[in-house]
Amino acid sequence: MGETGTEAGAETGTEAEVPPKRSRKKLAGVLAAAGVALAVVAAGGAFAVVRLWQDSVGRMPEDVLPASAAAYARINLTPGLRQRLKLGALIADSGGKGDDDHALERIVFESGPISYRDVAPWFDGRLGVALWADPAHPDAPVTLVAAAAKDADKARKALDAAQKKAGTDRLGFTVADGYALLAFGEQDAQGAATAAAKQPKLAGAAAFRSAVATLPPDQPLLVWADLGPAAKLAEKLAVSAFPYLPIEAGDPETVGLAGPEIPDDLTGTLVLGAQAADGSIEVRGRFIGAAQPAGQTPVDAVQALGQLPSGTVASGVVSGPFTAIEDVLGEDLGWMPLTLFGDLAMGPGLLPEGEVPEAVDPEAIQKYLEEHPEVLEGGGDRYVFLGPGLGPGNETMPDPQQAADAFSAGVQAAKALSFSMVNSATATGSAPLMLDLHMPDAAAAKQLQTDLAAFTRLTTTTCEVSGEHVLLKAKSYAPGTGKLAESDLFKKAMAGGVAHPYAALFFDSGSDQVGFTAGRDGADTVLFARVVMR
C-alpha cells in the first residue's frame, strides 16, 4: 500500500514539498541586522543609564534665563543618581539634614518681595538666580529667579497673590515650560520678567557654555559671572539697596560705603562648581581672561603650608607680588592687622548724643544719618585705636595711621606671606595670630622691623627677623608642637588640589576641615577646595 501510494503520488505530482534552502548570505545579513538593532537598543539603554548616573536630565534654569545675564547661580536639588547617592551619604554621615532643609531656597526667595511659603507647594528642586538688566533699561538692574514648577496652575495662583501684595514694580513673573521666571526690582518688575522671557537663553551663550565645560558634569551648585558687567550692575544695585547712604554710581568714595571698591578695569569670566565626593564636598573654579599679576614668585605653597604649626584653626601661604592688593583693599590693607592684633573703637565723646541704631535696621539708620549728617563728614577722624594698655588720652600713643602705612608697605614689598591662627580668645579681643612676611632680602627684613615699631607698640606684638622673614606674633599665639603636614586631616583636605599652587589655605573648625589651593593653567587662574565633613 505504501509503495503504491508513493508511486501514485509521483505519478500525479503530489509528493511532499521540501522547503527551499535559504541563501547563507541572506541569513547572515538578517542575523547581522538583528545584532545591530540589539546593540543599538542596548547602547541607547546604556547611554540613558550612564546619563542618569553621571548628569542631570531635563531643563535647567539656564534654559530659561536670558543670555545677556551678567551673573548666574544655580542650585540643583535633583542631580544625577551618582550625585544624589553621594549627597545622601554626606547628609547621613553628618547626622541628618539639619535644622532647616530649605535654607538655601529661603535665602533666595526671602531676599525679594516674596516668602518661601509662596513657593514651596509648587517648587520642583531646581533654582537659578541671575543679575540682569533689560537692554532697553540698562540702568535698572533686576534680580531674576528661575524656579522649576511641578504645578504651573499652583505657581500662577501663588505668584499672582504675592504680586498683589508686593506690586508689579517690585515683583514680576511668567510661568511657562515647567518654570516660573520671577523678577525682583524697584521699578516695573513685571515688564522686566516679560522682557527676560523673550530673550535668547543663557544655556546657548558661547561664553557660558565654554566656561561650564571646564568643570566636571553635574554640579549641584554652579556659579558663573561675566565680571566686568556684573560689577557694574552690582554697583547700581548697591545704589538702590542703600538709599540712606549718599552713594553715587561711579564714585568710589561713596560706593565704598556699601562694600569694597570694585576696580574699574575688572575683566574676565568666573565659573565655580561644587559637587559631593566621598566624605567631602569638592569645589572647583576658574578665572578665564582675567588680568594676571606679573612676576609671580615660584613657591610650593602646599609644602610651605605643611611646615606651619599644627593645632591651628586657620593657616595659609600666598605668593606675591602684592602690589595690586591696595587697589582692592585701599587703606583697609594697613588697618586690618591693627584690628586683628588690637582693638579698634570709637573714642569717648566722638559720636553725637543719642542711641546708635543697630546695623540690621535700615530705616533707623537712615533716620539717624538724616539727624546727624556730620557722622559721614570726615568720619575717619572719629576713630581712634585703643591698643592694649593705651587710650586716647595717652599723649605718647603712637600714630595708628603711621603703623598702618608701614604694614601696608611691607606687604606690598613681600615675596610671600604666611599666617597662622590658633583658637583662643583674649581679654582685649585681639586675635591669636602669627604673620610671616617673606621680604626680598635680609636688609629689607631688618628695615621693615624698624618701620613697624609703632605697629608693635600699639598692638604689643613681638616682631622678630629671621633671614629674609619678618615674624609678627600676638602674645596669645600658642600653636601646637607638631606640623600640619603630620596631620591626616590636613592631608585629606589638601588632596586633589591644584598642581604647583601659588596659594594654599587650611581651615579646621574641629568638625569640618577645608583645604584650598590656587594656581595657573595657562592664562587662567584655577581654584580647588575640599570640605571634609565628619
Image (tube, rainbow, N blue to C red):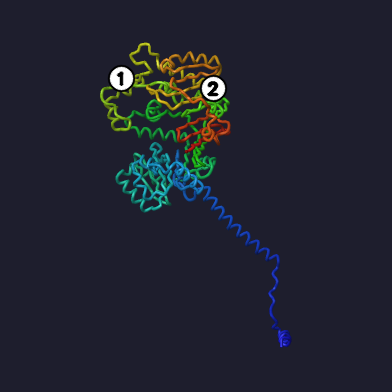
Residue shown at 42%/51% (left/top)? 178
| N-term mark: 2 or 1 | 1
Per the rendering, the mark at residue 350 is 1
| Picture layout, residue 190 above or below residue 391 | below
- Residue 233 visible? The answer is yes
In this view, which residue lies farthest toward the top? Answer: 396
Residue shown at 32%/46% (left/top)? 162
In this view, which residue lies farthest toward the front? Answer: 481
Alpha carbons under labels 2 and 1: distance apart: 40 Å
Per the rendering, the mark at residue 179 is none
| CA neighbours of label 1 inside 10 A, class few (<14), some (14 to 19), many (20+) | few
Secondary-structure class at tag 1: loop
Out of 116 and 371, give the one closest to the viewer: 116
Q: Quadrant of residue 91?
A: top left
- Residue 66 visible? The answer is no
Out of 185 and 521, give the one closest to the viewer: 521
Secondary-structure class at tag 2: loop
| Picture layout, residue 373 above or below residue 32 | above
Out of 321 and 197, give the one closest to the viewer: 321
- Asked if the residue under mark 1 is in contact with the one under mark 2, i.e. CB atoms within 8 Å, the reply is no
Count of all numbered marks drawn on residues in the image = 2
Q: Quadrant of the N terminus?
A: bottom right
- Residue 369, percent from left and from top: 29, 27
- Residue 390, percent from left and from top: 36, 15
Badge 1 amino acid: Leu
Residue shown at 70%/82% (left/top)? 15
- Residue 334, percent from left and from top: 44, 21
| CA neighbours of label 2 inside 10 A, class few (<14), some (14 to 19), many (20+) | many
Give the residue at mark 2.
415
Badge 2 amino acid: Lys
- Residue 192, percent from left and from top: 38, 43
